[in-house]
Image (spheres, rainbow, N blue to C red):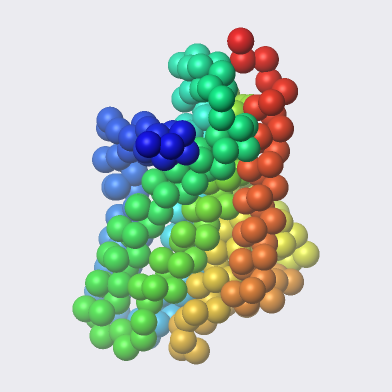
Amino acid sequence: MTAFAAMYTNTLRQLLGGRRIFGLALISLIPTFIFFMVTRGSTRGVDSMVGELFQAPYISLFMPIIAIMLAGAALGDERRDQTLSFLVLRPVPRLVIAATKSLAAATAASIFALIASSGIAVVYANVGGDGQVFFPILAGSVVVMAVYGAVFTLLGLVITRSTLVGLAFVFLWESALVYNFAGLAKLSLWRIGAEMTDSLFEASLKLDDSAFGVLDRTMGGSLTRMGIVVVGSIALTAILLRRRDNV
C-alpha cells in the first residue's frame, strides 16, 4: 500500500470513527426532516420549496457545519494528540500529506452529503416533484465539501478551536456580511457549491438571484473558484507543515 493510500485510509477511519459519525448523520438528516415538514399538506409549489431549503439551511448551514467539523479534525486531531510530529517525520512530501488530509476530509463529508441529498430527493419525489434534484444537489454539496474541507484542514493545523472559528465564519461572514454586500459573493465558500447546483437545475428549480450577488452562476465559474480555493489551501497547508517545528 502506498503512503498516500495508507494515510488516506487511516484518516477516513479517524474521521468516521467513534460517536462523531452518529452526530453528523443526524445533522445530515435535518434538512430532509425540514423539507418533509414544510411540504406536508402545503399548497405551494414544491419546486420553490426546494430552492428555499437548498439556499437557506441546507447548503449554507448544515453542509458547511459537517465539513468544518471533519476537516478541522483531519490535522487538528493529529496536533492535539501530539502525533503530527510522527506524521511529518515520514519520508512523504508535505504536499502529499496536505492533499491527502484534505481529500480524506472532503470524502468523509461527502458521505453525509450523499445521505442528505438522497433524503431530499426521496421527499421531493413523494410530494409530486417532477424535476431531477438528486444529482444537482449532490454535485453542489460535494463542491462545498471540497472547498470547506481544504480550507478547514488548513485552519485545523494552525487554530486550536477551528470548529468555533468555522461557525463564526458561517454565521457572521457568510450569513451576515456576504448576504448584505453582493460584491463579497466571490469570497463566499458555500456559494461556490450553489453555483454548481444552479447550473444543473432545471428552469423551474433555479435558485433566487439574491443568493449569488455578482456570481455568474455557471458550472465553469464554480469549478474555477473551487480549484483556486482547494489548490491554494493545500499549497499553504504544505508550506506550514514544512515550516512548523514538529519535533
Q: Quadrant of the N terminus?
A: top left
Residue 240 visible within the image: yes
Q: Residue at x 26, y 40 (%)?
A: 22
Closest to the observer: 201 or 224?
Answer: 224
Report the number of numbered marks.
Answer: 0
Closest to the observer: 247 or 191?
Answer: 247
Q: Position of residue 108 (x, y in %)?
A: 39, 46
Q: Residue at x 30, y 33 (%)?
A: 17
Q: Position of residue 15 (x, y in %)?
A: 38, 35
Residue 175: quarter of image? bottom right
Instruction: Say left or right for 217 vs 214.
Output: left
Closest to the observer: 140 or 104?
Answer: 104
Picture layout, residue 58 above or below residue 202? above
Residue 223: quarter of image? bottom right
Picture layout, residue 114 above or below residue 245? below
Residue farthest to the top, as pictured: 247
Q: Residue at x 55, y 79 (%)?
A: 199
Residue 96: quarter of image? top right
Q: Residue at x 34, y 44 (%)?
A: 24
Q: Quadrant of the C terminus?
A: top right
Residue farthest to the left, as pictured: 126
Q: Position of residue 126 (x, y in %)?
A: 21, 78
Residue 44 visible within the image: no
Picture layout, residue 48 above or below residue 10? below
Q: Position of residue 164 (x, y in %)?
A: 54, 33
